[in-house]
Image (cartoon, grey):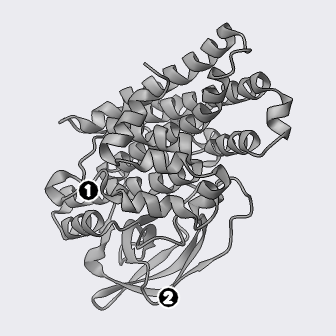
Amino acid sequence: MRFLEPERETLETFLPGLDGRLAALPQAERERPQGPALALFREAGGPGLVVPGEHRGLGATAVQAVRLQRALASRSPSLAVATTMHHFSVAGLIQAYEATGGLEWMLLEAVADQNLLMASGFAEGRSGQSILASSITARQDGDDIVLNGSKKPCSLSASMDLLTASVTLETDSGPRLAVALVSADSPGVSVHPFWGTAALAGAESDEVRLKDVRVPADMVVRTELGEDGSLDRIQTVGFVWFELMMAASYLGMADALAERVLARERTDPAERARILVELQAAMGAVVGAAAPLDGDGPVGQAELLQALVVRFSAQDAIDRVVPRCLEALGGMSYVSGDETSYLAACTAALKFHPPSRAWSGPAICAAYAGGPLVLG
């Protein structure tokens, strides 16, 4: 069995031809803003990947999705990050439909039938602020909800058809957390430059602003925190998907460097094996943590806790492996082109996705001491 063979076979099964088309493009072309990678993903039917078959999607399981995402990231880090946000949003939409039995099924079918891309406007962790806090406010006005605020960075900002956004909804009983679904062409939605680095620029992570954007009230789903501060089912499942898909994606970026090391026969076989063992072990943990999402039982705090553990474990493995890959490939590989340094720069960004280690550390310790897992 070749390195990444199961992952690339999964990618080929669900999105035939995409891996070959991406591999045929120069890395700079795959990674540039508004380049061909997202268009190729759409053409292959990628937006419907995790949409259930009953809603006309491809029906990939969570385990299949993380495997596919690892393979995708080994070809295009930007595409993997951008599409993780899409799949995470779709997973949240599925949970909202299961919880409310509302009109979300129509949107799921539209995503699959029309290959629509969903951007994720959920709060990024800002220093000293809850990861659940939203910079977007919402208020009722007649039959509509009016949204104001911005999300930055927001991946897929240039290519999105729909935006799912966490909002702070004003109610008679005080502010409540909610999730709003917004059409990208709604009056008041605008995109502004924000991303200032070349790394992952193809993910289109700029600023999305909402100014007096009106959405129907049934396109806003209320969410709740438990009395102990724990997340509800929609939020919990969404976070599990997010952490595991991101971990798989960033492992795939490190894998792209490891593939180059594996092909370099002058490198000590023991060192090559150590690199591969670290990456394969980390991915095995991701797959194991994804399996409960495909089961019949509830996904709760225990599964979210495990997803966080796996994410930070993968992050640590990447931090150990990438410098060793760079050393094994040698200085000439680093200075003779941008590919090696670019991949190394991309892998560092896993640290910046919420929740941060500093924020989640106390929550993890409290959960393993028998308390609730409180991320808010």
The reply, left or right, for residue 88 in relation to residue 274 is left
The answer to whether 270 is drawn above or below residue 254 in the figure is: above
The N terminus: image quadrant:
top left
Q: At which x and y percent is residue 373?
A: 44, 38
Residue at image position (45%, 31%) is: 367
Q: At which x and y percent is residue 224?
A: 34, 58
Residue at image position (36%, 55%) is: 46
The reply, left or right, for residue 298 in relation to residue 317 is left
The reply, left or right, for residue 353 in relation to residue 227 is right
Q: Which picture quadrant has residue 339?
A: top right
Name which residue type carries label 2.
Gly
Q: Is residue 242 visible?
A: no
In the rendering, which numbered label is found on residue 94? 1
The answer to whether the residue labelled 1 contacts the one labelled 2, judged by CB atoms less than 8 Å apart, is: no
Residue at image position (38%, 58%) is: 89
Foreground residue among 87 and 198: 198
Q: At which x and y percent is residue 376?
A: 49, 51
- The residue at which mark 2 appears reads as 188
Q: Is residue 134 visible?
A: yes
Q: Which picture quadrant has residue 191?
A: bottom right
How many other residues sit within 10 Å of disc 1, few (<14), some (14-19) or many (≥20)? many
The reply, left or right, for residue 92 in relation to residue 350 is left
